[in-house]
Amino acid sequence: PEILNNCSQLSSLPLQILLYVNGVYYIFYFLATLMMIVYKSQVFSYPNDFLAPDLLMLFIMAILEVPRLYFGSKGNLTEEEAPLGLSLVLTLGSVVLAVYFLAWQTYVLRADVILTALLLSTYGLESGLKVMAIAAFVS
Amino acid sequence: VTELCVCDLLVAQCDVNCCCDPDCSAAEFSLFTTCSVPIVVGDSRLCSQKAAVYSLDVEANPPEMIFKLIDQVNPSVFCIHATNYKQALSFSSPKMPTSENFDQLLKEFGSAAFSAGPHGWDVNTDRQNPSDANETYRYEYGVPIQTVDAFLRLPSPVVSSWCSDANPAGFLVNQITKCTRSVSVKNCGDIPAVSMLFYINSSILAVSKCLEFIFQVNITVQSIAVQSPDGMRTLLGGDDVLRIPEVLEGLCINIVLGVSYHITYTEAGEIIEAAAAFVLGTINEEALSIQQSFEISFTQANTEPVPLSGNPGYVTGLPIRAGYRPQGYPFPVEMTTNKFSQLTLLQSTSSQDCLAAQGARTPILFGYNMVAGCTLRITAAMKCQPLAQTLLDLLKGQSFPQYVASFGNSQAQDVLDWVPITHLHISEQVRMYNTFQSSCQIPVSLEIEVKWTKYGSLVNPQARIVNVTATITTTTLKQLPSGRERTIPVMSSVVFTDVSSPAVPGYKAWPTINVKLPFDFFFPFV
């Protein structure tokens, strides 16, 4: 058997799987939340003053997600702490936005609660794994 | 939800089959058969909410009402878990108007459709204020004419025919009203509305351009006509002394029977002159009410009021305009039209005596054929020539015009727009043996025939007068033996004939093929 290198692999496989799953799940979450906002605006009384912040938050979250996942993946694969650290900071922002969608939205439906809770748990798990990976890379 | 009960309609009484009614006692519950309101919930879209359930337990003896407060769970995945928008789930209560927000509320809800709200349309409010400061305060069409105290009143009938004094006269709104007022000889001095003073007392506020002062226009008395009990009106000339109702020998005189206001205004909307013409009458002891008629008309300053009878074609029902050309000059001069040169017809009176009702004439209205007549008593003592002249004056009126306007709006300057009146004479000859005997011809009938045609486009034809013929029929008056008298009928009529030729359809020309050889077709040979 050939040994390609002497070092053991430091990249965390569960983190990578989670990042990939997170990406797919987030696309689904974004579309579902958008559809539900449209549904809420039709069924309930949803004045423009309340609709605009909700949509804004959703799009900011989407924009935040892309670099977060990219840096997380890059940092994990290249075994560098800096991108992982940046990704961790961005995850914090995403968590705040997810809490907004869980509690501070204009209308929080049960489906919203389920989806966002799932997203938050994913974020939490990811953060934990990232911290462990950074610890592994640093040392 | 425990306090909500939609079936509790009777206050302090038990409603039948209403399980949530707090006024019901256990004994009354036992008489119920079912619960009309089994469950009371709030908004069912919420994920979990309290519900009050009422049911009747018919098994127990006596039946009792069971009340349960449960948590109802909405199984749908789209139920509202929480909401941060307070007004989402209930109707908003309308704002109470206070002095601060009244203007904004009026702007939002005051018109037929609600405007966008307090945020929208801020631009308009800024634009309105500066223009108000510069706008001159003037009268506009329909605005009530203000006097020193309240408004210029034009009493008119409201609901029934009794006079109501609360009808204001509107600016530039010509009105004619007639109403009944109850007056008797006993209280004729107490009722203000039958006295001249009531109508000219307060002066009209005529607003001027500069807002510094508003000057008043006094209502002047233009003329007073006194109407006798049998209807004859006499114009009192000279003095316009105020005449107040007074009781004289059992009659009450100087009662106002009619007022005609004439207001002169300028183009800027100010009133510069106001005049009132009165008709005063008398009532006797048997009279319980009088009929008053009021009229108001507006004239622009420096213009002659010539009401058009149509624009341009005559309108049915409006008087025919006529005039006469001043004599002397052969070249065309303007027509003169004034009130006295209208085409008029003899007016029948109730007494049917020609000589009694002299001067009463009715204007000829376009399109209305009229016939009028009276009877004349001829005695032997009447001479032929003055009688013939009297009858001619009676038939034709004081000033019979020479020309009639062909259009309703013909101007006096356009001489060609005026149609001359053709006069015809027909004499009924009575065959007599001795034709040389000088016979006395007196006119007994005047027939005016007005021929008119439709002029203009097919969809909107205008009436235009093309020919007016006045035919006077005379008859021989036989000499009467002395002491005898005869009555002859005198008749006057006007007939309108439509002589319009039917419209000829005009067809478009057939398309032709315009083929011509070019002029140099046969070049070498031509």
Image (cartoon, helix red, strand yellow):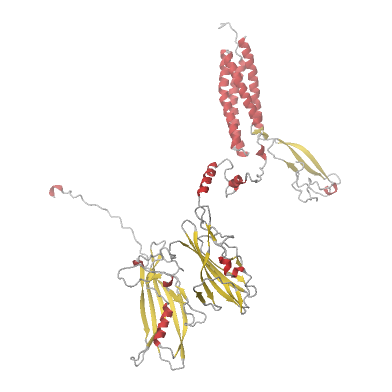
Nearer to the camera, B502 or B236: B236
Can the viewer see residue B214 in this picture? yes
- How many numbered marks have been drawn onto this rendered protein structure? 0
As drawn, A37 above or below B219: above
As drawn, B435 above or below B286: below
Q: Is residue B217 left or right of residue B513?
A: right
Nearer to the camera, B243 or B513: B243
As drawn, B471 above or below B483: above
Image spot of residue B17 (x, y percent): 78, 49
Q: Is residue B381 left or right of residue A122?
A: left
**Outermost residue toward the left in this view:** B525
Quarter-wise, where is residue A99 in the image? top right
Nearer to the camera, A86 or B146: B146
As drawn, B427 above or below B310: below
Image spot of residue B200 (x, y percent): 55, 66
Image spot of residue B195 (x, y percent): 59, 70
Image spot of residue B489 (x, y percent): 45, 84
Q: What residue appears at the point 38 percent right and 76 percent down from the top-left corner?
A: B470
Can the viewer see residue B444 in this picture? no
Nearer to the camera, B172 or A97: B172
**Outermost residue toward the right in this view:** B61
Q: Is residue B63 left or right of residue B406?
A: right
Q: What residue appears at the point 52 percent right and 77 percent down from the top-left corner?
A: B232
Position of the N terminus of chain B by quadrant: top right
